[in-house]
Image (cartoon, rainbow, N blue to C red):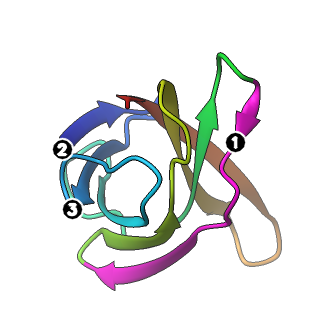
């Protein structure tokens, strides 16, 4: 399962599940690539990745761990979609902007639907 999307701020997010397709009620990992609006690897970002089941109003039973791999790549561990139906995988891209004495944390994201 390979999916791609673009955030409102122009980050290009590509995601591949390992194994593919996403298994039902079994652990899996994601490899997520984040490129900036110009197509270069987004190095100074961190990710938060969660699963949400919109029809049931709940998320996953596990917390994920995201490890940067370099060149805009991140490995997401701890994914487990425990029920059949429509899931959304939310990928939040978080970065800092500004000068050394004043900066703000910015957040943007993209959502990928997964039907199990």
Mark 1, other Cα within 10 Å: few <14 / some 14–19 / many ≥20 = some
Magenta residues, start to end: 57-70
**Any magenta on residue 65?**
yes
SS category of the residue bearing label 3 = loop
Name the foreground residue: 22 vs 38.
Answer: 22
Rendered residue at 37%/74% (across/down): 75
Q: CA distance from mark 2 to mark 1?
A: 20 Å
Q: Is residue 17 visible?
A: yes
Q: Position of residue 32 (x, y in %)?
A: 32, 59
On screen, 73 above or below 12? below
Between 61 and 101, the residue placed more toward the observer is: 61
Name the disc covering residue 1, or none: 2
In-front residue for pair 102/56 = 56
Q: Quadrant of the N terminus?
A: top left
Q: Which residue in the structure is indicated by mark 3?
A: 19
Q: Residues within 10 Å of mark 3 (few under 14, many from 20)?
A: few
Side of 101 where 36 appears, left or right: left
The residue drawn where x is 73% and y is 78% is 100
Which of the two marks, 3 or 2, is nearer to us in this view?
3
Residue at 36% across / 71% down in the picture? 74
């Amino acid at each position: 399962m390979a999916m791609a999307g673009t955030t409102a701020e122009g980050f290009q997010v590509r995601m591949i599940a390992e194994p593919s397709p996403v298994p039902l009620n079994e652990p899996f990992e994601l490899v997520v690539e984040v490129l900036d609006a110009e197509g270069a690897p987004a190095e100074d970002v961190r990710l938060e990745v969660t699963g949400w089941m919109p029809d049931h109003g709940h998320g996953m039973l596990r917390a994920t761990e995201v490890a940067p791999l370099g060149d805009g790549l991140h490995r997401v561990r701890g994914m487990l979609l425990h029920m059949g139906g429509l899931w959304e995988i939310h990928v939040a891209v978080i970065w800092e902007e500004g000068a050394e004495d004043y900066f703000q944390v910015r957040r943007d994201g993209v959502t990928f639907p997964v039907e199990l």
